[in-house]
Image: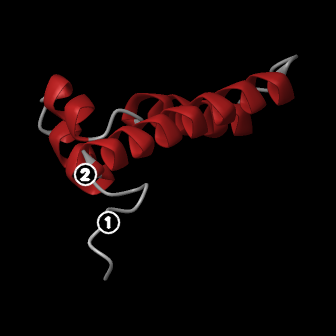
Amino acid sequence: MFGLECPGCGIQRSVHLLFQGEFVSAFKMYPAIYPLVLLLFFLVTNLFIKFKYANQIKMSLMLMTAGFILINYILKLSTIFN
């Protein structure tokens, strides 16, 4: 609508590339794909196996994922305006 990408733009294409085995292209498309996959893997695993420091691990992974998304979005915006 405004000509700007959203913070999640590219995630679907990145997942598609990931399933095709194009790991580097998936990262280039959406750099937060790997922290996001790691977070989802941990959350699913934690349903079946209880970890001692699960809350701290979960919070760390969420912050890392949010950081990747934010940094990627800022870099996309900086290239648009330059």
| Amino acid identity at mark 2 | Ile
* In the image: residue 2, left or right of residue 67: left
| Amino acid identity at mark 1 | Leu
Q: Is residue 46 above or below residue 80?
A: above
The image position of residue 70, as x and y in percent, is: 52, 41
Task: Give the residue furthest to the top.
Answer: 52
Task: Look at the image and tell me in which quarter the N terminus lies.
Answer: bottom left
The image position of residue 23, as x and y in percent, is: 19, 26
* Sequence-wise first label, 1 or 2: 1
Q: Is residue 54 above or below residue 37?
A: above
* In the image: residue 61, left or right of residue 75: right
Real-space Cα separation, disc 1 to disc 2, in angstroms = 8 Å
| Residue designated by label 1 | 4
* In the image: residue 7, left or right of residue 80: right
Q: Is residue 25 above or below residue 14?
A: above
Q: Are marks 1 and 2 in contact (CB under 8 Å)?
A: yes
Helix, strand or loop at disc 2? helix
Helix, strand or loop at disc 1? loop
| Residue designated by label 2 | 80
